[in-house]
Image (cartoon, rainbow, N blue to C red):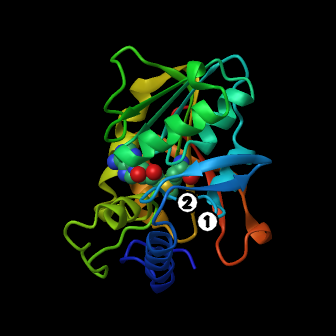
Amino acid sequence: MTSSGSGPSRAALVRGTWLVSSTADGVTEPATFRLRDREWDLLPGVFAPNYCESTAFFTESLPFPAGGSFLEVGCGTGVTAVSAAAEGCTRVVATDISEAAVENSRLNASRHGLSGRIEVYRGDVFDGLRPEDRFDLVFWNSPFIDPGAGAAPARVQDERREGLRRAVFDPGYRAHRRYLAEAGTRLTAGGRLLLGFSDLGDHDTLHRLADEAGYRISVLRTSGDRVRGIDYQLLELVPSDD
Ligand SMILES: C[S@@+](CC[C@H](N)C(=O)[O-])C[C@H]1O[C@@H](n2cnc3c(N)ncnc32)[C@H](O)[C@@H]1O
């Protein structure tokens, strides 16, 4: 089912469109959900980990650096960032382009008594960070579907749906390009760069962007049969000259 650079697969468009619609229609008021033995706040318009298995899979698969620093790009509800702090990262920074996601992550940091250890900023990819910020682990559970020309444009003035579309679709992989091109300047010496992707993503384009940015891709873990219908892939971007 892997998409091959010639536009999104039909499966990717169907799944992405379903996820946006079902979450937009299903979460119209602040709500809560349970994941990883904790209760979490969920705001309308924010990627909902109870509608999609990727958050749980990546969060349990990430090699959080105990005593080290962690940057989560695109933090959504903040499940991964809060888990990183709870599991021993001493400095956790989370960013998201969505104001609702920033608010949601702050709510969950507070709910779990970890506000003092998690900074949350609004920004496009690495915008919002201080110039000197460096991390031992950088991760993004990315909007890995490029909708190509096939996806209907979002309705104007539907902020909730637009926020959800940005959580699922990255037109032209523009944000992926930035992530790969700029991440190197955000890593400590020996720091690791990871990406949450899936077989619904365009692997040919991702490999090309990684190559242009000086990385090769190594598959750390896949969800395989554990998740029905989609294979989530935790990828590491390894400098090509390593
Ligand atoms: C697949 S969701 C993952 C959310 C959360 N990390 C999780 O696992 O539940 C992708 C997230 O990336 C955010 N996002 C999309 N484009 C972005 C960009 N250019 N810069 C920062 N965040 C972005 C979305 O708002 C969304 O919260």
Mark whose residue sits in front, 1 or 2: 2
* Disc 2 C-beta below 8 A from ligand 1: yes
Above or below: residue 5 compared with residue 190: below
152 above or below 198? below
Considering the image in quadrants, where does the C terminus appear? Answer: top right
* Residue that mark 2 sits on: 48
Q: Position of residue 237 (x, y in %)?
A: 54, 42
User: Number of numbered discs present?
Assistant: 2
Q: Are marks 1 and 2 in contact (CB under 8 Å)?
A: yes
Q: Position of residue 202 (x, y in %)?
A: 45, 67
Residue occupying image coordinates x 36% and y 77%: 7
Q: Name the element at disc 1.
A: loop
Residue 234, how many percent across, how many down?
64, 51
**Which of the labelled discs sits on residue 52, or is there none?**
1
* Image disc number at residue 193: none
Q: Position of residue 153 (x, y in %)?
A: 24, 75
Residue, x 63% and y 59% (percent of image)?
54
Relative depth, front residue between 40 and 12 = 40
Q: Quadrant of residue 51?
A: bottom right
**Can residue 7 be seen in the rendering of this structure?**
yes
Tell me: 27 left or right of 205. right
Whether 168 is drawn above or below 148: the answer is above
Q: Residues within 10 Å of mark 1 (few under 14, many from 20)?
A: few
Tell which of 209 and 100 is nearer to you: 100
Beta carbon of the mark 1 residue lies under 8 A of ligand 1: yes
